[in-house]
Image: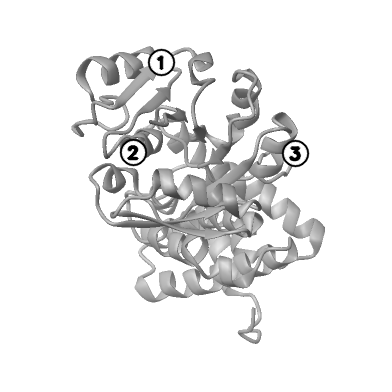
Amino acid sequence: MTTIGIIGGGAWGTALAQVAASDGQQALVWAREPEVVASINAAHENSLFLPGRKLSEGIRATGDIGDLADCFAWLVVTPAQHMRSVLAEAPASNVPLVLCSKGIEEGSGELLHDVAHEVRPDAPVAVLSGPTFAHEVAQGMPTAVTLAARDLELAERLRQRLSRSTFRIYLTDDVAGAEIGGAVKNVLAIACGVVEGRGLGQNARAALIGRGFAEMTRFGVGLGARRETLAGLSGLGDLVLTCSSTSSRNYSLGVGIGLGKSAKELMADRRTVAEGAFTAPVLARLAEARGIDMPIVAAVARLLEGADVDSVLGSVLARPPRAEGL
């Protein structure tokens, strides 16, 4: 029996633990919140982040990250901006890391797999990404994801351990592509939420998804990603899901901004993190430095800084038409 370690006891970490502990297997969740540890161990439920969902008895929780030292692999599900510090405090080990968060590190502008390699240079790194709402995964509803690793033998071992009939895993060696899709779609989801909150209609949202995908592709290809990865589960698939439902934290943040609330006010009210709010400014900065045209991303960054919604929308709509090619 191979125990999977889950670094992070939020809704997504708990849902992944449910996947990892099915079929009589074991998962060990590390969480900072004592109430999460107590709830999982005593009641087989994460009452703080995933209330009402009965968890497998194969899931245990701990507040000591050192307890994960002997696990088969670690699924790293901490917020992107805290991943570096959490990995630094984890026990010394060359256990494979599966990065399950989506974002770009704000201070360094690095993709998360580069951060992980810096902090844990001896550990193999993979990325798990795709269109996933935690509550659906925890219920065992059909889901498909991308698992990216440069070492495809490692990826296959991980797939064999984590794959289920309702949790289908597709492999790629395009790590950058899988990460970029997941990071950029969060920013575009905020933009789609603004469209919804402003009552601009379904046509506008569909256009934004299409043009946003063009921005994602330009940026990804500029950083060495493959177009087919960006057009797959971890890119276009995740983009469509996150831009279409209030179950998305980023979309909900955008709706609030569209309704006239400030991003600062909305984010202060949240227990969970809308990663796109941290990714947008660094993504806009990286795109500008590389000469990559990303007007929707730039507009979201301005809105998060407190710019007037109608003014930002007006400037985007006033852009001259161009050929539709990516």
In this rendering, which labeled residue sits more in front, label 3 or label 1?
1
Under circle 2, the secondary element is helix
The answer to whether residue 6 is left or right of residue 199 is right
Local crowd at mark 1 within 10 Å, few (<14), some, or many (≥20)? many
The three-letter amino acid code for the residue at tag 2 is Ala
**Which of the two residues, 62 or 295, is positioned nearer the viewer here?**
62
C-alpha gap between disc 1 and disc 2: 16 Å
Query: Taking the image as drawn, is residue 249 in sight?
Result: no
Q: CA distance from mark 3 to mark 2?
A: 29 Å
Q: Which residue is mark 3?
A: 108
Q: Is residue 109 left or right of residue 36?
A: right
- Measured from the top left, where is residue 258 in percent x and y? 43, 54
In the rendered image, the vertical position of residue 135 relative to residue 235, given as above or below:
above
Q: Looking at the image, is mark 3 or mark 2 earlier in the sequence?
A: 2
Residue at point 64% right, 83% down?
325
Q: Give the position of the N terminus as an image quadrant.
A: top left
Which residue carries the number 1 mark?
62
Above or below 27: residue 91: above
Residue 192 location, x and y as percent?
44, 61
Left or right for 88, reference 79: right
